[in-house]
Amino acid sequence: MDTTPWFWLLSKGRNPFDYPRSTLRRRVHPLFFQSLAWVDASDFRIVRLRTDLLSPLPELSLRRLTAEIQFSHMPVAGVVSPLWLPHDVVVVSNFGGQLLRDNHKYSNYRIFRVKTKILLNP
């Protein structure tokens, strides 16, 4: 793996039909984010992703919302090659004046298979 990272700045558009939103007291509040992606220059895999709230939302008492995701090769039972999956996620928020930090660790991924059949006239 080439340790020289490439940085990509991604910003969520302001199209009213294309943004995440939160609803509080029957009022919709748009959430605008900006993201940075660290990409391995040797194979173009995303190694790390960071997403930040672009501006505070005082009407929701939300001053900060940041997510950082670390990716790595994760072996999955039943899959020949390891998959590039999240292994560590940290979410930091400042909500209602409280600083919150959530740590998520992922491991022991499993794959599930399903067979379906469509019955046109049961």
Image: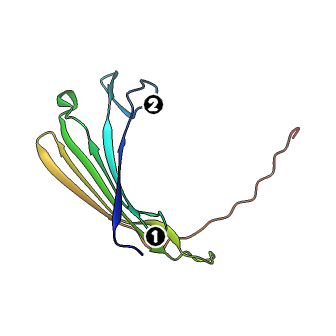
Residue 40 image offset from top left, x and y in percent? 41, 66
Residue 90 image offset from top left, x and y in percent? 28, 59
Is label 1 in a helix, a strand or a loop?
loop
* Mark closer to the chain start, 2 or 1: 2
Task: Identify the residue shown where x is 42% and y is 26%.
Answer: 15
Would you place residue 5 above or below residue 51 in this image? below
Q: Viewer-proximal residue, 79 or 38? A: 38
Identify the residue position indicated by label 1 in the image.
42
Amino acid type for the residue under numbered disc 1 = Ser
Residue 5 image offset from top left, x and y in percent? 34, 64
Is label 2 in a helix, a strand or a loop?
loop
Residue 45 image offset from top left, x and y in percent? 46, 64
Task: Identify the residue shown where x is 86% and y is 39%.
Answer: 120
Distance between the alpha carbons at the discs numbered 2 and 1: 32 Å
Amino acid type for the residue under numbered disc 2 = Asp
Give the farthest residue toward the right: 121
Task: Identify the residue shown where x is 27% and y is 45%.
Answer: 52
Residue 21 located left or right of residue 42: left
